[in-house]
Image: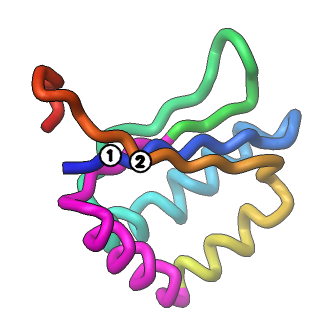
Amino acid sequence: MIYEERDYRIKAGKLKTFVDHYEASGLEIQKKHLGTFIGYFVSEIGELNHVVALWAYRDLNDRLARRAAMMADPDWQAYLKLVDGLIDLQNSRILLPTGFSPLQ
């Protein structure tokens, strides 16, 4: 398994709007297309206005195929229009579990 950590810095004052849109419109579309949903988090201490999403995939090819299918979904394109202008910065990291990690 591989894990993807997607970190979004949301524009100040827009975090609740972004999270509400995701819960109402984005999450189910992603669950339909992507790998295993691990969790969704917001920052409370430190650099604020961050959302972190964690997803699990079999491998990089699985991730690429699933993300391509999602990007082709008209419902996902409509969701992207809802959140247009709310994201300030986005980062994505692929994480590989160690041999002793509880998540494999």
Residue 94's disc is 2
Tell me: 81 left or right of 67. Answer: right
Q: Position of residue 39 (x, y in %)?
A: 37, 38
Tell me: 50 left or right of 71. Answer: right
Quarter holding residue 77: bottom right
Residue at the (56%, 55%) spot, across then down? 22
Q: Mark 2 is on which residue type?
A: Ile
Task: Tell me the quarter of the image containing the C terminus.
Answer: top left
Residue 19's disc is none
Residue lying farthest to the top in this orientation: 45
SS for callout 1: strand
Q: Position of residue 17 (x, y in %)?
A: 73, 46
- How crowded pointer 2 is (Cα within 10 Å; few <14, some 14-19, many 20+) is rated as some
SS for callout 2: strand
3D distance between C-alphas at marks 2 and 1: 6 Å
Q: Is residue 16 above or below residue 17?
A: above
Residue at the (74%, 30%) spot, across then down? 49
Q: Is residue 86 magenta?
A: no
Its colouring scheme is rainbow
Q: Mark 1 is on which residue type?
A: Tyr
Q: Are marks 2 and 1 in contact (CB under 8 Å)?
A: yes
Residue at the (61%, 37%) spot, across then down? 51
Q: Residue under circle 1? A: 3
Q: Position of residue 25 (x, y in %)?
A: 53, 64
Q: Is residue 64 magenta?
A: yes
Residue at the (40%, 84%) spot, across then down? 69
What residue span does the magenta drawing correspond to?
53-74
Tell me: 49 left or right of 104. Answer: right
- How crowded pointer 1 is (Cα within 10 Å; few <14, some 14-19, many 20+) is rated as many
